[in-house]
Amino acid sequence: MLWSLFKILLFVALVAALAFGVQWLMDVSGQVLVTFNGAEYVLPPLVVVLGALVLMLLLWVVFKLTGLLIATLKFINGDDTALGAYFDRNRERKGYAALSDSLIALASGEARDAAAKAQKAEKYLQKPEVTTLIVAQASEAAGETERAKEAWKTLVTHDKTRFVGIRGLMRQKLEQGDTAMAMKLAEKAFALKPRHVETQDTLLRLQARDENWDGARKVLSAKLKSGALPKDVYKRREAVLSLADARNQLADGNEEKARAEILEANRLSPELVPAAVMAARLHIKNGEKRRAAKVLKAARLKTPHPDLAAIFAEIEPEETPEARIKRFQPFLKVAPQAHESKLLETELYLAAEDFPGARRALGKLYETEPTTRSLTLMAAIERGEGGSEAVVRGWLAKAISAPRGPQWICDTCGTVHADWLPVCTSCEAFDSLSWKSAPVGSASTTLPSEMLPLLMGPSTAAAAPEAVVPAVLAEDVATVEDAETSSDSPSDPDPEAEVVDNAGAPEAMDPTIVGTTRDMDGTSGQAKK
């Protein structure tokens, strides 16, 4: 709109300037004296200017006629292409001018105008591999899907633009959610240009989504060969593919194949936690305790994950709490400054009912890193040391609303996952899950009952999720049951159904925050008063 108004104003200004110039020439006093071949001619200024313009026009006509005459003479002398080339130059000049205008319109966001000028350029140039491409892009920008689709199909029929056409159709199918057709188009595009990075990424994502791990391996190898993927990233993603394939093999009952894939995944990426967990369990099953410990320590060095500690506890399932604390010391020293190490050591002391030792191990973590797990551990310590009910439940009330701490979070879309997966369930990104803390205010899939992965031996490792809260909080079960009963019967309120925080404000107790657990020897624990 503004551009059209500007052109109108410019035209009016030019007309006004021309009229002013003619009027000025007519009003100018004086004459122009021209001497030619001994004769003198006296002309007014306006006539001189008009004569100059006419002379320029005649020169242009003479130049064109001369070019046509030369082309005609060449044609007469036997050059059959002379006249065609003469007229082709004119068409090319007009065609490239229209093509240039089309590109400028497309860059300016005037999609419909760009498509119209591209079609005009096609009439002169007869080069659909260029003009049809602009029509396709302009139609997509204008939201004309069908017109763009026909343009992409036209490009597929030409050898030079076949890849471009397939890629355009593939993008359309992805936007429409037709992943099956998009997969076929991506495979064709990959066959034409195996080194094209975008096609590699798209095909890898679609194959991982459909659990086509063999196909994904081929694409991954092509990315490595083309230099689009660093060697360390390749090994990590190859490990992810091996681990995902191992899970499928286990589901199909192919244990030997699954075992080989698990060990290969752990070899390629020792820091990959799920692979380390599965590999360690294989070693424990075969009686290779030292190899299991080595695998778990190597993974813990990069990612101190609670699952690694849980499997480390399975190495010696029958040991006493005191013996377990001693055996875990080298494991804790792998990442001594990690918050997970402090939380793990605190849980070990709680299992041994050494509450002063648990407080020393936890330190000020409940202040510097107030998570559900650290605050619940603080509640367990207070209860074990004989703290009041108000103090204990105050810690529990804080734990309910506190951040969950590190979780499996997608680096691409930020979705929180309860367990590690090779493909994000939200954005379908491949190998995008990292063990880290979620941003403040984001949703969590981790339940409060899962916040304390205490390592209490085989009975606890196989226990239900509600059996993970320390034994020192077991007496709160009855209180929570009373709270649930009172919520169903408003006429008979139970004063124990409220939790008093440190500020004295009542909050409803979350029944999943408390439960029973087991001691290191598998017996039911009781609170120490």
Image (cartoon, rainbow, N blue to C red):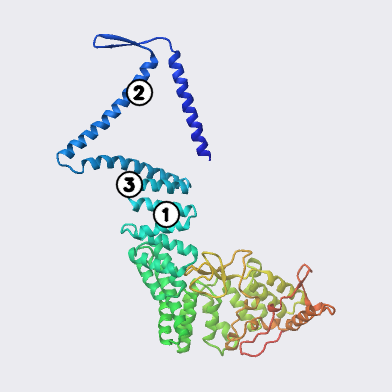
Q: Position of residue 487 (x, y in %)?
A: 78, 78
Q: Which mark is residue 125?
A: 3
Can residue 191 be seen in the rendering of this structure?
Answer: yes
Which mark, residue 340? Answer: none
Q: CA distance from mark 3 to mark 2?
A: 33 Å
Q: Of callouts 3 and 2, which one flags the residue occurring earlier in the amino acid sequence?
A: 2
Q: Quadrant of the C terminus?
A: bottom right
Find out whether the residues at labels 3 and 2 contact each other: C-beta distance under 8 Å.
no
Q: Report, in whole angstroms, how far the alpha carbon at label 3 lies from the one at label 1.
A: 17 Å
Type of amino acid at the residue the image marks with label 2: Leu
Q: Nearer the viewer, residue 148 or 270?
A: 148
- How packed mark 1 is, by other alpha carbons closer than 10 Å (few <14, some 14-19, many 20 or more), is many
Indicate the quadrant where residue 236 lies.
Answer: bottom left
Q: Residue at x 37, y 41 (%)?
A: 97
Q: Secondary structure at mark 2?
A: helix
Residue that extends furthest to the left in the rendered view of this protein: 77
Q: Residue at x 48, y 46 (%)?
A: 110
Residue to which mark 2 is pinned: 53
Do the CB atoms of the residues marked 1 and 2 lie less than 8 Å apart?
no
Residue at disc 1, secondary structure? helix
Disc 3 on helix, strand or loop? helix
| Residue under the point 53% across and 39% down | 2
Q: CA distance from mark 1 to mark 2?
A: 44 Å
Neighbour class for label 3 at 10 Å: few (<14), some, many (≥20)?
A: many
Examine the rendered structure and indicate whether residue 284 appears above or below residue 171.
below
In this view, the residue in front, 102 or 389, is 102
Q: Is residue 379 left or right of residue 408?
A: right
**Where does label 1 land, which residue?**
136
Q: Earlier in the sequence, mark 3 or mark 1?
A: 3
- Residue that extends furthest to the right in the rendered view of this protein: 491
Would residue 297 be found to the left or right of residue 472 on screen?
Answer: left
Which amino acid, by three-letter code, is at mark 1? Ala
